[in-house]
Image (spheres, rainbow, N blue to C red):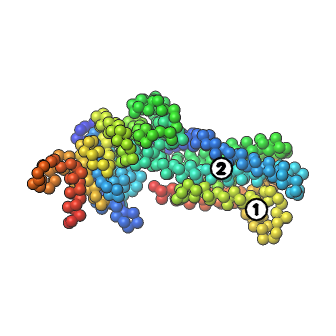
């Protein structure tokens, strides 16, 4: 189908416009994905922050990468939710019986996830700036940060797609994200891992979030990233590929 | 379009879900420009037939041609020439009526999506509600919007899977009016229903599906002839289609 291929990106644009409207019309989504991480940032900086010892004098600088990951982990649960609702309402069947590439529907949701998470990340960084976040990073480092966050978003989004496609209820569709939202707490996102008991520390230092947080923190403070960036990239790309394969399989099974 | 042209031709269609046979050999033909009703109780296999003909499901055995395209080898062309109004109103509840129609018009790559939306809103009496979210619509309005979305791009053949299930009598009569208008304009309508009166009111030809098989098909007049001879009673009355239906199924059951 030559014509269908020619329209692929245009159709995906229509799908993107559709789900962006869903986001903008849902106060709940906006509050959960931006206001909650911002509240958490306020809480950690102005309440707990005084008691936390890090190797940085500016705790906002230390905290920001972890907050961004939490915001993204919250954001992708809505991708699963929206996909699940599409199936429930039968609109997915309508799209599938139309002369458009079936994968546009899925890619539309994935693209929406990227765009909406990018928006909430920017909003949170702006608030962090007001709270005293400062960065000496150059443009290239910022591009690298954006790239890693985008990869992290994609990896989690494909997990969300699996959850959305295979869930039996609305609650089930978004429940998978809770452990992911929790991961940054058991990492170096809020406190240095040195302060944790040995088994917890071992887990914290070897789970994906720590390497991602450390990499972003190093990039933003203009420090050498060392090996962490490769570990972070390997985690993101690895999770993304595996999740993508399973998501596509679940999608084909759905018809 | 030629009156004698065949819009749908189905031979020996079989489908099982996990070894449970749903369709056990379905054959029928639908003339272009006619209203064809598939009548049967819940679980008879009506929706499965619709899903196969609209390329949402693949048959296990048998063949089917829709608008002269083989559904197995040419699903893209099939989708180009049909539209589906599924069992559950497949509208996007977050979008307004107008936005729903514009979205479908864009996905069908029409050159003037807004004009198309305006025309259909007017035609189905939704102009006043055009800019309200579909979630605020009544069941009847939602169904009308659903049908309007199926009319975008003027497909030659429209599938309506239980279009009046769950509607109040008034909304039901409205849908009937729309279906009659469609057929009057030369569109082929393939309708499934569990309401005998609906088939009686609308259909040029009726096929009764029971336990995965078409047990009888013909015009209403032909079906009436199949009715067992009238018993001698004090009051002789014409059999209703309901009686025909139950009698035929009862007879099959005994065999």
Residue occupying the point 56% across, 54% down: A170
Q: Is residue A143 left or right of residue A108?
A: right
Residue occupying the point 62% across, 53% down: A77
Extreme residue in the left direction: B232
In the displayed structure, A72 sits above or below B109; it is below
| Residue wearing tag 2 | A75
User: Label 2 is found on which chain of the structure?
Assistant: A
User: Label 1 is found on which chain of the structure?
Assistant: A
Q: Earlier in the sequence, mark 1 or mark 2?
A: 2
Question: Of residues A155 and A127, which is closer to you in this image?
Answer: A127
Q: Is residue B223 left or right of residue A90?
A: left
Residue A121: percent from left, percent from top: 72, 45
Question: Of residues B133 and A113, which is closer to you in this image?
Answer: B133
Q: Are marks 1 and 2 on the same chain?
A: yes
| Residue wearing tag 1 | A186
Residue occupying the point 38% across, 44% down: B167
Residue B198: percent from left, percent from top: 29, 45
Q: Which mark is residue B133?
A: none
Labels 1 & 2 near each other (Cβ < 8 A)? no
Q: Is residue B224 left or right of residue B36?
A: left
Say if residue B65 shows up in the picture. Answer: no
Q: Secondary structure at mark 1?
A: helix
Question: Of residues A212 and A163, which is closer to you in this image?
Answer: A163
Q: Quadrant of the N terminus of chain B?
A: top left
Which picture quadrant has residue A54?
A: bottom right
Q: Quadrant of the C terminus of chain B?
A: bottom left
Residue B169: percent from left, percent from top: 34, 41
Q: Secondary structure at mark 2?
A: helix
How dense is the environment of label 2, judged by Cα within 10 Å: few (below 14), some, or many (20 and up)? many
How dense is the environment of label 1, judged by Cα within 10 Å: few (below 14), some, or many (20 and up)? some
Question: Of residues B248 and A11, which is closer to you in this image?
Answer: B248
Say if residue A165 shows up in the picture. Answer: yes
């Amino acid at each position: 189908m030559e014509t269908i291929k020619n329209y692929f990106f245009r159709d995906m644009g229509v799908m993107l416009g559709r789900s962006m409207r869903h986001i903008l019309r849902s106060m709940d989504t906006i509050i959960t994905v931006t206001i909650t991480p911002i509240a958490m940032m306020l809480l950690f900086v102005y309440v707990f922050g005084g008691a936390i010892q890090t190797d940085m004098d500016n705790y906002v600088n230390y905290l920001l990468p972890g907050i961004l990951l939490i915001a993204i982990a919250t954001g992708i649960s809505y991708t699963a939710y929206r996909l699940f609702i599409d199936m429930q309402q039968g609109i997915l069947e309508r799209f599938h019986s139309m002369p458009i590439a079936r994968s546009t529907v899925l890619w539309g949701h994935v693209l929406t996830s990227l765009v909406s998470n990018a928006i909430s990340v920017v909003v949170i960084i702006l608030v962090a700036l007001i709270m005293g976040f400062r960065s000496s990073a150059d443009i290239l480092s910022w591009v690298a940060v954006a790239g890693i966050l985008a990869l992290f978003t994609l990896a989690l989004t494909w997990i969300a797609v699996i959850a959305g496609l295979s869930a039996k209820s609305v609650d089930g569709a978004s429940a998978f994200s809770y452990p992911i939202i929790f991961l940054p707490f058991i990492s170096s996102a809020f406190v240095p891992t040195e302060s944790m008991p040995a088994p917890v520390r071992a887990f914290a230092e070897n789970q994906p979030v720590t390497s991602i947080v450390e990499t972003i923190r190093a990039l933003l403070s203009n420090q050498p990233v060392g090996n962490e960036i490769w570990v972070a990239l390997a985690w993101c790309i690895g999770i993304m590929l595996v999740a993508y394969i399973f998501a596509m399989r679940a999608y084909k099974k759905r018809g | 379009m030629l009156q004698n042209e065949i819009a749908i031709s189905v031979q020996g269609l079989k489908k099982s879900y996990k070894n449970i046979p749903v369709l056990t050999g379905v054959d029928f033909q639908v003339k272009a420009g006619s209203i064809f009703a598939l009548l049967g109780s819940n679980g008879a296999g009506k929706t499965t037939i619709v899903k196969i003909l609209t390329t949402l499901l693949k048959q296990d055995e048998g063949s089917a041609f829709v608008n002269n395209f083989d559904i197995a080898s040419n699903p893209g062309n099939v989708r180009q020439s049909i539209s589906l109004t599924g069992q559950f109103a497949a509208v996007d509840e977050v979008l307004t009526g107008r936005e729903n129609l514009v979205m479908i018009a864009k996905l069908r790559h029409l050159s003037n999506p807004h004009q198309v939306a305006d025309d259909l809103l007017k035609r189905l009496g939704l102009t006043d509600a055009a800019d309200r979210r579909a979630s605020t619509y009544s069941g009847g309005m939602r169904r009308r919007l659903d049908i309007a979305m199926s009319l975008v791009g003027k497909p030659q053949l429209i599938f309506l899977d239980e279009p009046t299930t769950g509607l109040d009598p008034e909304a039901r009569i409205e849908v009937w009016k729309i279906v009659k208008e469609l057929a009057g304009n030369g569109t082929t309508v393939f309708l499934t229903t569990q309401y005998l009166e609906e088939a009686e009111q609308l259909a040029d030809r009726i096929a009764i599906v029971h336990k995965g098989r078409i047990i009888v098909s013909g015009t209403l007049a032909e079906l009436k002839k199949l009715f067992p001879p009238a018993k001698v009673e004090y009051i002789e009355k014409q059999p209703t289609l309901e009686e025909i239906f139950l009698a035929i199924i009862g007879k099959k059951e005994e065999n």
